[in-house]
Image (cartoon, coloured by chain):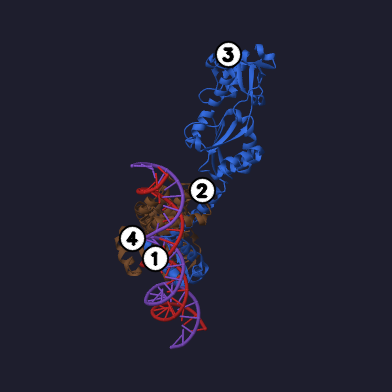
Chain colours: A blue, B brown, C purple, D red
Amino acid sequence: MEARHLRYALALAEHAHFGRAARSLGIAQPPLSKQIADLERETGARLFDRTRQGVFPTAAGEAFLVRARRALEEMAGATADAGRAARGETGRLRLGFVASALLDPLPDVLGRFGRERPGVRLELHEMASGRGAAALIAGELDVAVTLGAPRGAGAEHLVSVPVGRDHLTAVVGSAHPYAGQASVSVDQLRRQPLIVAAGEDEPAVAACLRVLLGEDTAALDGATMARDVHTIMGLAACGAGVGLGPSRMREAPRAGIRFCEVTPRTALPDLVLSFAGRDRSPALGAFLDTVRRTCPHVGAALDARSGRA
Amino acid sequence: MEARHLRYALALAEHAHFGRAARSLGIAQPPLSKQIADLERETGARLFDRTRQGVFPTAAGEAFLVRARRALEEMAGATADAGRAARGETGRLRLGFVASALLDPLPDVLGRFGRERPGVRLELHEMASGRGAAALIAGELDVAVTLGAPRGAGAEHLVSVPVGRDHLTAVVGSAHPYAGQASVSVDQLRRQPLIVAAGEDEPAVAACLRVLLGEDTAALDGATMARDVHTIMGLAACGAGVGLGPSRMREAPRAGIRFCEVTPRTALPDLVLSFAGRDRSPALGAFLDTVRRTCPHVGAALDARSGRA
DNA sequence: GGCGGCGATACTTTGCGTGTATGGACGGCG
DNA sequence: CGCCGTCCATACACGCAAAGTATCGCCGCC
């Protein structure tokens, strides 16, 4: 059975007349008679009563037409849905991001994207850089925002562009000896218990801190590992030590903490947006477009690395 | 777009490989390539990503396949539903009947039919004979059980078979003078206020009573008109007069009434089952079949009047 | 009883889906 | 590094099935 049979049966039911139904279908009457006969043979049921007054569906015909209508609607809907999905109007976008990204570039991007593409279901997953990179490579994410570009097996197929940079800032509890200082030195940091989000899951940050603190790894090895910037600030507020994180932290001030610049000023790994260079979904394309328009300086980098879009 | 395109797309998604999908469809690989290409051109969206690892649906393809699956299910369901409807396993049967038919032949028939054809939706409408006949002729009922065969314009296209006969019985309140009598005469009836269900809507019963009570129409003209047997018995119980109805009334005894035979014994119009000779729906056929098997003597009459079934 | 409308049937035509053969791109392997 | 194998796309010829044309059979109607 083909869709044609359904269309013909519906037209016949609508016009109650072979000739007129055929005309409305743009074919001659005999082919319509034949197709309806074929359909009745295939279903094994008489679908129409041919009377002098007109052609009317039988009980079996009524039952058939109900589902035939639905079938054709589904077919039309399939094309429409495919088109919408292809234009990025619908779909799903799985975004992984480090918590600190929520402080600066993401609010603008997500707000704008949600407004422009209400049909795209955004799945947001806060996760450390290492896990985000792995999930992206494994195909569990469509796009990830991490600290530093993903490295390692599989990362070569990713496209990465920097979307934000920041420098290291210290955070301490209000009662901490450093609380009044505008800045702290590396020596001062070495003498205090440190709180960092720089474990295996944040390799770029860990590397950055290793460079800053030098060969003596004791300060880092003994540091408290926090999941994200909020945990760093929370622990600092408790007086657990000196927290080290991006200066973006100042965007989320909370009671009981003070910020100090780190001397010398130390650049943190770039906040990097990555996605699979291949298999770019329309929703991802739309998202990148929003990013491009939200952060103008990102556009050129995107064009250079992913070839158009 | 034809159903073929949907089947091909689903097979391709399932096998993730043009060659194997084509083999599973019983065609060669190039035609499958062409049909998929045609489908993508028609939908205006790329539906499959051809990679070395295999052929996978894009986001648009996923959206398309979801509805394609539904469309094909509807098509298969349309055929299945039509078959069921044609075999009388599903459908609708609108049955009109006089209240007294619920006392005798209908309980067995309806019980059996409900058990044998659980898929048929029975619509039961209690109504007087005249209205039942009119509704049948107007196509508002599929089958009617009336007192006497329908008459008048349009009735010639109906097939009617008797399904039960009965004779006139009187019913009075317990305190009525006739309450102790085994039978009442026509003269006694003429001297009492009568309660009958024999108005315009029950022409056959009215005619029957006119014959019984003779030329003197006073007794009938002054009779209380009741809707049905239950109303007759209720009014009789109140002492409103002598009720006249079928002896089937004895099947539904109630407090406060007594029955008396009418002398001479007077046959009431047959309980008649009627339906449109043309346009017999499968559900109706199944119902007639149940009637035939429930009331053996009806079978022959049915065969004789409706030519097989 | 002739006429007209309607659906079915017979036969021809045509278009499209299919098969065979082949091309082109990419990856694996010697 | 070049050969080969795999896989999908393209080219072209074939055949079937759907559409067209002509006609028949049936039934009401004037």
Chain letter of the residue carrying label 1: A
Single out the mark in the foreground, 4 or 2.
2
**Residue A273 spot, x, y in % from top left:** 58, 35
Residue labelled with disc 1: A38
Q: Quadrant of the N terminus of chain A?
A: bottom left
Q: Element at badge 2?
A: helix
Q: Element at badge 3?
A: loop
Chain letter of the residue carrying label 4: B
Single out the mark in the foreground, 2 or 3.
3
As rendered, which of C26 and A282 lies closer to the eye?
C26
Chain letter of the residue carrying label 2: B
* CA separation in Å, label 3 and label 4: 92 Å
Single out the mark in the foreground, 1 or 3.
3
Residue at (55, 26) in percent of width and height: A204
Q: Three-letter amino acid code at disc 3?
A: Pro
| Residues packed near mark 2 inside 10 Å, few (<14), some (14 to 19) or many (20 plus) | many
**Residue A99 spot, x, y in % from top left:** 58, 28
Labels 3 & 4 near each other (Cβ < 8 A): no
* CA separation in Å, label 2 and label 3: 53 Å
Residue at (58, 16) in percent of width and height: A194
Residue labelled with disc 2: B60
Residues indicated by labels 1 and 3 sit on the same polypeptide chain: yes
Q: Three-letter amino acid code at disc 2?
A: Ala
Q: Quadrant of the C terminus of chain A?
A: top right
Q: Three-letter amino acid code at disc 1?
A: Asp
Would residue A244 appear left or right of B199 to someone viewing this image? right
Residue labelled with disc 3: A193
Residue labelled with disc 4: B289
Residue A97, located in which quarter of the rendered image?
top right
Q: Element at badge 1?
A: helix
Single out the mark in the foreground, 3 or 4.
3
